[in-house]
Image: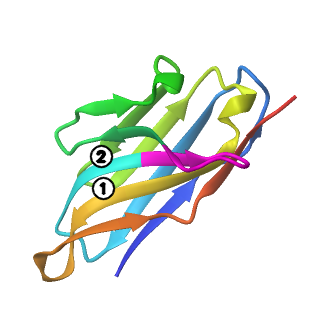
Amino acid sequence: QVRLLESGGDLVQPGGSLRLSCAASGIILSINTMGWYRQGPGKERELVAEITRGGSTNYADSVKGRFTISRDNAKNTVALQMNSLKPEDTAVYYCNADLYGFASRLYNYWGQGTQVTVSS
């Protein structure tokens, strides 16, 4: 009923930048928190950054000062601007959303993931 579609993953050199985007579509009344998670090789999925509907943000310590999360409530989109990328940022990045959808219930959805590889 709701789909989160990510884009923007790519191969980039250390020190480079990428911008990930995620668009939510389907039966959506309103979206609470939207976030980005990542799962590196052999690692557990971890929170990268999240943003509330009101614009409050939270970042993992490892990305503070390098990544910026933003959202457009009117378009149901969230973006992650990633600067000064490091090899340890290599992972599959997933979009996540807490939203009110069908029957005015609260749901949590995940995107399919987009690969970010940082390598020279």
Residue 36 in percent (x, y) is at 45, 46
Q: Residue at x 22, y 35 (%)?
A: 55
Q: Image check: 63 left or right of 104?
A: right
Residue 31 seen in the figure: yes
Quarter-wise, where is residue 54 in the image?
top left
Residue 49 has which mark?
A: none
Asked if residue 8 can be seen in this view, the reply is no
Q: What's the coloring here? A: rainbow
**Mark 1, residue position:** 75
Q: Nearer the viewer, residue 43 or 24?
A: 43
Residue 44, percent from left and from top: 58, 49
The range drawn in magenta is: 36-46
Taking the spot 56% from the left edge, 47% from the top edge, the residue there is 38
Q: Do labels 1 and 2 touch, CB within 8 Å? A: yes
At label 1, which amino acid type do we have?
Answer: Lys
Position of 108 relative to 80 (above/below) = below
Residue that mark 2 sits on = 72
Q: Check the picture and name the quadrant holding the N terminus.
A: bottom left
Residue at point 46%, 21% (across, down): 64
Question: What's the amino acid at mark 2?
Answer: Asp
| Secondary structure type for disc 2 | strand
Instruction: Determine the CA span between mark 1 and mark 2.
Output: 5 Å
Q: Residue at x 23, y 32 (%)?
A: 56
Q: Is residue 1 magenta?
A: no
Q: Position of residue 4 (x, y in %)?
A: 44, 65
